[in-house]
Amino acid sequence: MNERELQALVERISLHVFHKPFRHRAIFNDRLRTTGGRYILSTHHIELNRKYYEQYGEDEFIQIIKHELCHYHLHLEGKGYRHRDRDFRELLKKVQAPRFCKPIVLPKKGKTYYYECTSCRYMYVRRKAVDTTRYVCGFCRGKLKKIKREC
């Protein structure tokens, strides 16, 4: 996917899901490492991480775009656009966008453990084993389940 296709995708999602036009730029930022994307307050542009598109595919990438468009549209309307704001959380639920994106799985040296929350489906990647009877999800307090993954 190139920049022109990305811009067209973001504009199409904005019209179909939010029923509002996206009038700024959507670009790939290859320097992003741990986040799926970000909304720039000063320019109103959206920067997206290409690695998420390559690793998880277009469906997960569209979820990240919807999340960033929530920031975009709420900020332009003068409503609460931050993660902690009620307006933001309600709009996320309305458009079925995730509050947090999945972590990128990078090839690491040594053994890696994968855990998934049974409630919110957030995936944790750890180098040390976690006692699932003592620890819970940091976002929703749900139970953790160990996953076997081959990388």
Image (tube, rainbow, N blue to C red):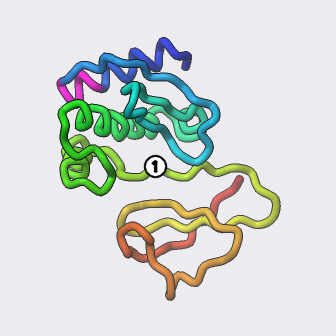
Task: Look at the image and say whether residue 61 sits in the magenta stretch.
Answer: no
Q: Residue at x 28, y 25 (%)?
A: 14
At which x and y percent is residue 53?
A: 54, 33
At which x and y percent is residue 147?
A: 57, 66
The residue wearing badge 1 is 101
Give the amino acid at mark 1.
Cys
Task: Look at the image and say whether residue 16 sits in the magenta stretch.
Answer: yes
Asked which quadrant contains residue 111, the reply is bottom right
Q: Nearer the viewer, residue 46 or 36?
A: 46
Of all residues, the one furthest to the front in this rendering is: 42
Q: Nearer the viewer, residue 88 or 116?
A: 88
Asked which quadrant contains residue 39, the reply is top left
- Report whether 131 appears left or right of 67: right
Q: Residue at x 55, y 52 (%)?
A: 103
Q: Which residues are magenta?
A: 14-19
At which x and y percent is residue 89?
A: 24, 52
- Report whether 93 appears left or right of 1: left
**Neighbourhood count class around disc 1 (C-alpha, 10 Å): few under 14, some 14–19, many 20 upward:** some
